[in-house]
Image (cartoon, rainbow, N blue to C red):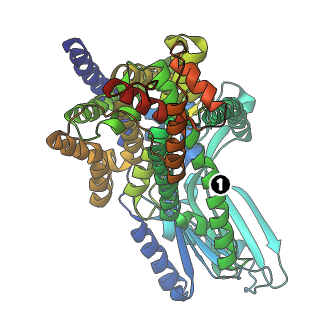
Amino acid sequence: MSKKYLYFFITAVFLSIVIWGRFTYPQFAFIDLSINKQNAVDIAKTYLSNKLQVDVPSYHNAVVFVGASNADRYLQKALGFDPSIEFIKEHDLEYFFWKVRFYKENEQEEYRFTISAATGEITNFKHTILDSDTRPEISEPEAQERAIQFLRKQFKFNPDEYILQSNHSKKFDHRVDYTFVWEKKGVYVPWSAEPDDGGAKILVGTQVSGDEILTFNKNSLEIPEKFNLHIARLKTTGRNLALIFRMVFFALLASSIFYVVVRRNDLVMHTTKNFCVGLTGAIFALHIMTYFNEFESVIYNYSTTSSLASYIWRAITQFFMDSFIVTIGILMPCLTGESLHYEQFREKKEGAFLHYLLSSFRTRNVAKRIALGYAVAVIMIGIQSFAFEFGQRFLNVWVEYTWMAQLSASFFPFLTAFTLGFIASATEEIAFRLFSISLGKKFFKNTAVAVFLASIIWGYGHSTYLVFPMWFRGLEVTAMGIFLAIVYLRFGIIPVLVAHFLFDVFWGSSAYLLGKSTPYHFYSAVTILLFPLIYALYAYFTNCPEDERPMHWRLSKHQRFNLEVLKYYLQGHPIDSSKKIEDVKHEIKNHGWDISVVELALKELQDNTKTGPTTQNK
C-alpha cells in the first residue's frame, strides 16, 4: 500500500471514530440487558409456583426476545432520540423484553410473561383459559377494587395519577371476566402538527376473573391509529423498492445461470468450481446452524391445536426447502463472477478468489488485506453515523434501535452473529461486487457505471427495515456500497469481505458490546470480532509463496481416454499452420469434443513441437 493510501485510511479511520463517538455511541447508553434468558425463565417459574401454585414441571416453556419497536419509532418520530430516552425514564417504560411461554401439548390453557431485560420485572402477564372454565362470580366494583389492589402491590400503582379509560365485562357460562384500563394523567404525545392525527398515551390494564388476575400490563404506550397507518404506508414504499430490487436481482441471477451454461467449459470456472461449491455448502450449513440456534423462536409460535412433533416436522421441512433455494442462488454468481472478473479485470488479480486459489490464502499479503478490512469496517460505521446524523437533522429521518438485541434469544447469540455476518458478507460481496461489477463492465464498458448500478441495487435491497423513511436506508447503504466498490477495485475481494463481516457482526452484537449486558455476551462478541485478525496472524507467520500456479484442467478417466484418442488423431492429421489456434479449438469443439480435452491435446502437441520432432514429421 502506498503512503497516500496509508495516510488516507489513517485519517478516515480517525474521523470515523470521532463521528461515531460524537453522534452514535451515546445512543447505546439506554440499552440494559442485565437479565439473561435463564434469569427470565427462573423469574417466570417463581411467579407461577409461588403466587399461582402452578405445577411448573408439567409445562413446556419457550423464550424469545423482543423490542418495543412501535414505541421506539413513535417516540423518535414525535420527540427525537434524546427526549424519547428521557420520556421512557420519566414514565418507567421499557424497550427490551423477554417473552416466556408455558404451555402443554394439545391444551389451550397456557401462561405468557413479558419480563424486563433491564430489571427482571414482570411487565405483562396473560393466563389463557377455556371459555367453559369456572370462576367465582363477583360484582364489577369488587373486581375493580381487586384490580387496583393488585396493581398497587405489583407496580406501586397510584390511582390518583390515572383516570379510568375503559372498563367492560364479558359473561361466560360459568364466570364473568372484567377488563379495566387506566390512562396516565397529563401524558399526551402528538406525532404531527395536525390536531386530528392523535397522540400517544400511557396505559395500565388488567383483567379480573373471580379471585384471579388473568392478565395485567404495566405502563405501555398506546399509539394512535393514524400513526400506524402512516408507518404502514412507509413500509409499503420500502417493500415496493425491495420488490424492484428482487426483480433486478432475479435478472442478475438468471444472467449468471446463462453465463454458466454458455461458459460451462471455461477454464476459470473449472478451476474455481470446487471452491464455489464448497462455499455454497458452507453457507447452507451455516443457515441450518442458525436456524437451530434460534429454534426456540419456532417453538414459541407453536399452536397447541396440533401435535408438537407434526408442527416441528412441518417447520423444519419448510425451512430446508426455502434455505436450499436461497443458498443455491450464490453458486451461479460465484462461478460467473470469477469468469467475468478474469475477462474484464485481468490486471486486478486480487479482486477474485482465483488468484488465491492458484497461490495461497496464507500469505502476508492476505494478512495485510485482512487488517485493511478492519479499517474499512470502521470507515463504514463512520459513513453510516454521518448519514444518520445528517438525515435526522435535515430530512426528518429516524432510526429504530430495538433491533440491536434481536439475537438474544439464540442459544448462542455470538454464533448467530458470526453466521449472519459470514453469510451476508460472502453472498452479497460475491453477488454485488465480484459478479455485478464485472457484468456491468462487460455490458456498459465503463467501470464507474458498473459500480454505481451495482451499489444502488445493493443499497435499495436494504430498504425494508430499521430506518424511516424507507428510501433513506437505500441511499445510506448505496453510499457504503460505492465506498466498498472502490476498495474492492483497488485492494481486492478480501478487504471488503472482512469489512462487511465485521460491520454486520458489530451491529448484530453492539447491544452486548456497548450496552449493559452479561460478561458472557460481551466477551463472546469480542471474540467473534477478532476471528479475522486471528487468521491474519496465522497467515502472516505462515507466509506461503504468493506465486500463481498455472491453471490446468482436471480430467476424469473418460476424459483422459478421449485425450489420448484426440492426440492420436491430431498426430496423424497435421494442423494447418495458417489457422489461428482459437479457430482450431472452435472447429474441433464443434465436432462434439470437450473443450478441456481439446485444449490439453493442442497444448501437449505444441509442447512436443517445441521440444521434439514436428507434428508434420510425425
Quadrant showing the C terminus: top left
x%, y% of residue 468? 59, 31
Classify 126 as above or below 460. Answer: below
**Residue 64 drawn above or below residue 425:** below
In the image, what residue type sits under mark 1?
Asp
Q: Look at 39% across and 57% down and name the residue there.
A: 415
Q: Is residue 209 depicted above or below 33 in this figure?
A: below
In the rendered view, does 401 fall on the left or right side of 4?
right
* Residue 76 in sight in this render: no
**Label 1 Cα neighbours within 10 Å, binned few <14 / some 14-19 / many ≥20:** few
Near-viewer residue (12 or 604): 604
**Judging from the image, what secondary structure is the residue with disc 1 in?**
helix
Q: Quadrant of residue 82?
A: top left
Residue 95 pos. (x, y %) = 49, 50
Question: In terms of depth relative to the viewer, which is nearer, 108 or 375?
Answer: 375
Residue 423 location, x and y as percent?
47, 46
Residue 112 visible somewhere in the drawing: yes
Within the image, what quadrant is residue 546 found in? top left
